[in-house]
Amino acid sequence: MSLYSRITGTGSCLPPRRLSNADLAAELAVSGVLTSDDWIVERTGIRARHFAAADVCSSDLGLEAARQALQAANLQAQDIDLIIVATSTPDMVFPSTACILQKKLGAHGGAAFDVQAVCSGFIYALTVADALIKTGTATKALVIGAEVFSRLLDFKDRTTCVLFGDGAGAVVLEASDTPGILASDLHADGKHVGILCVPGHVSGGKVLGEPLLKMDGKAVFKLAVGVLDEAARAVLAKAGKVATDIDWLVPHQANIRIMQSAAKKLKLSMDKVIVTVDQHGNTSAASIPLALDGAVRNGKIKPGELLMLEGVGGGFTWGAVLLNM
Ligand code: UT7
């Protein structure tokens, strides 16, 4: 049994339809909802987002990201014995998006399930995959964050609809004798359920409640900056490392100001932070693996470097993973 798990490949996918802030502002203006490129850039750092076509599901975006990650890891789909999809926008109520994706990949037989921890979903899923590999339950896992958040947006609410986008990111995590994932830290506090939620459900063949995203942005912002710092310090302590050891901070891509605050608290320069929120907005569980894959492919992140991944989102959930690439 291997002592460690290690990322051996990454991939990502953004749907082709890209809306700049100006494009979105023009669309919203038609129904009297006013926003501007200046406001969105200044408050969030977002410049564009991608929206999936109506017939494209989370599993389709996840499939493309997974294929890229498999190729990067030099593996075939049938080599994979565990698929975990982190998503809050599953294709169906059930079965899981992971099972649907497994079929689309042409694999079968390995374990497949979804993890629902909203924007912390990828951190949760990576930690679960690491644990299953360390116990010998799995040897080669696909861990995917995939979302079509555009389906949950209230385009009459300018305080939320400008923030989110669709996309997917994936990693292959393999059993390894050399250290990859060094430490994880996961948390939730259910008393904050109401500050970021989609309070609807299916019952008796009908959608009940409100199936669109509601957020108290200021409350989320305030909580996020505090808990991200706690999680980052916890994983550093568990791994016997200090902040100056970190080569790259790969945070959840929600708002540049939250990322700046996280970096400042760790006394890290923004040069050490992977920022892609400008290109795709908040893609929830997909945002960390999207940022990771972009930085691996453009050569910023190199083998052997120390990465801090950290996420925060609805639930309220948060967590961090420290790993060697
Ligand atoms: O994965 C976690 C997901 N969530 C987050 O990360 C969100 C965390 N929170 C945030 O990022 C910020 O709180 C927001 C970006 C959502 C809002 O930024 P803010 O600096 O807290 O703005 P605000 O809510 O205080 O709004 C300031 C003003 C308000 O106008 P008044 O009342 O001052 O006249 C808003 O009505 O900006 C107005 N406003 C907008 N104006 C133009 C709110 N949304 C918009 C908009 N365009 N899209």
Image: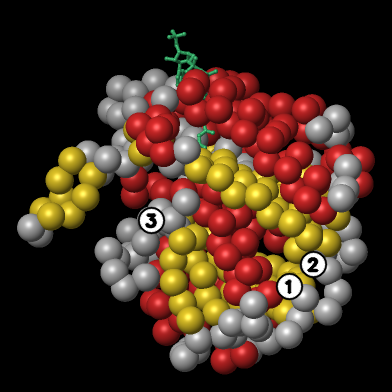
Residue 302 at x, y percent in the picture: 88, 61
| Disc nearer the start of the sequence (2/3) | 3
On-image quarter of the C terminus: bottom right
- Specify the color scheme: secondary structure
Q: Which residue is mark 3?
A: 89
User: What mark, if any, has residue 180 been given in the picture?
Assistant: 2
Q: Residues within 10 Å of mark 1 (few under 14, many from 20)?
A: many
Query: Quick check: 254 above or below 33?
Result: below
Residue type, numbered disc 1? Ser
Residue at x 68% of width, y 75% of height? 134
Residue type, numbered disc 3? Thr
Residue placed most toward the observer, 277 or 75: 75
Find the distance from the CA under tag 2 to the CA under tag 3: 29 Å
Quarter of the image for residue 213 reads: top left
Q: Which residue is mark 1?
A: 5
Tell me the mark number nearer the camera, choosing from 2 and 3.
2
Residue placed most toward the observer, 82 or 42: 82
For the question of whether residue 143 can be seen, the reply is yes
Residue at x 44% of width, y 72% of height? 113
Residue at x 39% of width, y 21% of height? 34
Residue 173 at x, y percent in the picture: 68, 73
Residue type, numbered disc 2? Gly
